[in-house]
Image (cartoon, rainbow, N blue to C red):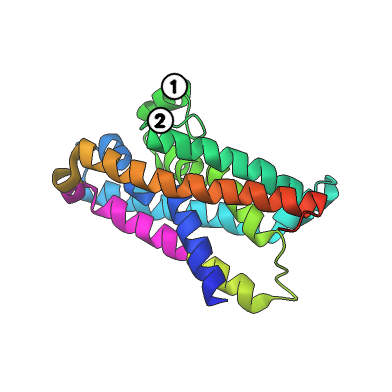
Amino acid sequence: MIESFLKFFVVFFLVVEPISLVPVFASLTEGASAQYRRRMAIKSVIVAGMIILGFALSGAAFLGAMGISIDSFRIFGGLLLFLVALEMVFARESGTRTSTDEQAESRRRADISVFPLAFPFMSGPGALTTILLWFGPVSVIDQPVLFAALSAAALLVLAISLGMMLAAGPLMRLLGATGTNVVNRLLGVILGALAVQFIVDGIRASFGITL
């Protein structure tokens, strides 16, 4: 269980990219009061947590209703996470998070907690795919301890994200844009390797390959 907790924490941390929230949050709240920044950060984490919990509880049932096996989803999820990893490595604006139109809309909105912070940054397609991959085989009734451990790992990542946003000002002065890109590239390499492992595991399970 400890191993599952650590593995899921690492994967979910790499997908959510709390470090990448620093320049985004700093830009969206530039010139705002400390009270506003604190309110947006806390509210966004709460909303993201609710979305993630909903997928953790009902994701497997949804896949079953659609007739999609967890192994098939694992292959597609691995491909999606691999694309996220490539975007991290090459320091590109993530197409799996926001489009140009969505970014423009976010600048016009007074409340940035739900969009774009909670969704799609903290609980976007990559994060929700990761939730389905890990929570899909886990039953909250039959494996409550493991479910609780994975949930705790997800909450820990969200707590780190909250801390990053609250400390966005000092962190931006410390890391700068270049430092943030360097860290994201290193994390992207690790996420890419994990994504490939998801694909390999999905193919093995789907075709009954044992190596």
User: What residue type is disc 2 on?
Assistant: Ser
Give the number of the mark in front: 2 or 1.
1
**Magenta stretch: dominant secondary structure:** helix
Residue 21: % across, % down: 34, 44
Residue 162: say if magenta: yes
Choose between 115 and 75: the one closer to the eye: 75
Q: Is residue 53 above or below residue 33?
A: below
At 30% from the left edge and 58% from the top edge, which residue is drawn?
A: 163
Q: Secondary structure at mark 2?
A: helix
Q: Is residue 114 above or below residue 205?
A: above
Residue 100 placement, left or right of 67: left
At 44% from the left edge and 21% from the top edge, which residue is drawn?
A: 100
Residue 152: % across, % down: 51, 69
Residue 83: % across, % down: 53, 35
Q: Residues within 10 Å of mark 2 (few under 14, many from 20)?
A: some
Mark 1 = which residue? 100
Residue 55 visible (yes or no) = no
Could you give the CA–CA distance between mark 2 and mark 1, rounded to whole angstroms? 10 Å
Magenta range is 155-171
